[in-house]
Image (cartoon, rainbow, N blue to C red):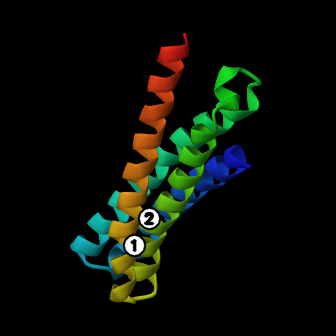
Amino acid sequence: MVLIFGALLGFISVAFGAFAEHGLRENITDEEFRFLMTAVRYNQVHAVVISAIGLALLSGTKLSGIPALKWSGMLFIIGTVLFSFSIYLSVYLSIPGLVNLTPIGGITIMGAWLLLLGCGISTRKTA
């Protein structure tokens, strides 16, 4: 399931990036466009990370048995959706209040990175 979400988020990042560049750019401010491109960049980077975690979970190796790895993947998904989609929807729908979710997404992503760090440390200890 993590791999599916990673692939879907990757697709959305490319599609929304193209839409922002070719469909929205002339209708929004430079600042809004900059916000969108930040959201697209975070979406793309974390889609790759989520996909890598999904592949690791499906690999059948020692990594696939670490519960924190699955939790890290889930937090990356939740954080990416909160961070990027709050910006996408805020700009596209002209609802500025949606960006109040953006920091929650960022904090969730930081938690995901810390869990991934913990996975790395725990695999090093058992190696």
Residue 13 percent across, percent down from the top left: 52, 56
Q: Amino acid at mark 2?
A: Ser
- Contact check, label 2 and label 1, Cβ < 8 Å: yes
Vertical side of 125 occupied by 71: above or below: below
Q: Which mark is residue 87?
A: 1
Relative to residue 64, is residue 105 drawn left or right? left
Q: Which mark is residue 61?
A: none
Q: Residue at x 57, y 40 (%)?
A: 68
Who is closer to the viewer here, 1 or 114? 114
Disc 2 to disc 1, how far (Cα)? Answer: 5 Å
Q: Residue at x 42, y 53 (%)?
A: 109
In the rendered image, the residue lying farthest to the front is 125
Q: Amino acid at mark 1?
A: Ile
Quadrant of the image occupied by residue 12: bottom right
Quadrant of the image occupied by residue 26: bottom left
Who is closer to the viewer here, 61 or 77? 61
In the rendered image, the residue lying farthest to the top is 127
Vertical side of 12 occupied by 47: above or below: above
Query: Is residue 1 at all visible to an observer of this figure?
Result: yes
Q: Secondary structure at mark 1?
A: helix
Name the residue beneath numbered marker 2.
Answer: 84
Total marks shown come to 2
Q: Dot 2 surroundings within 10 Å: few (below 14), some, or many (20 or more)?
A: many
Residue 95 percent across, percent down from the top left: 39, 89
Q: Dot 1 surroundings within 10 Å: few (below 14), some, or many (20 or more)?
A: many
Quadrant of the image occupied by residue 63: top right
Residue 60 percent across, percent down from the top left: 77, 24
Relative to residue 82, is residue 15 drawn left or right? right
Residue 86 percent across, percent down from the top left: 44, 74
Query: Is residue 18 at all visible to an observer of this figure?
Result: no
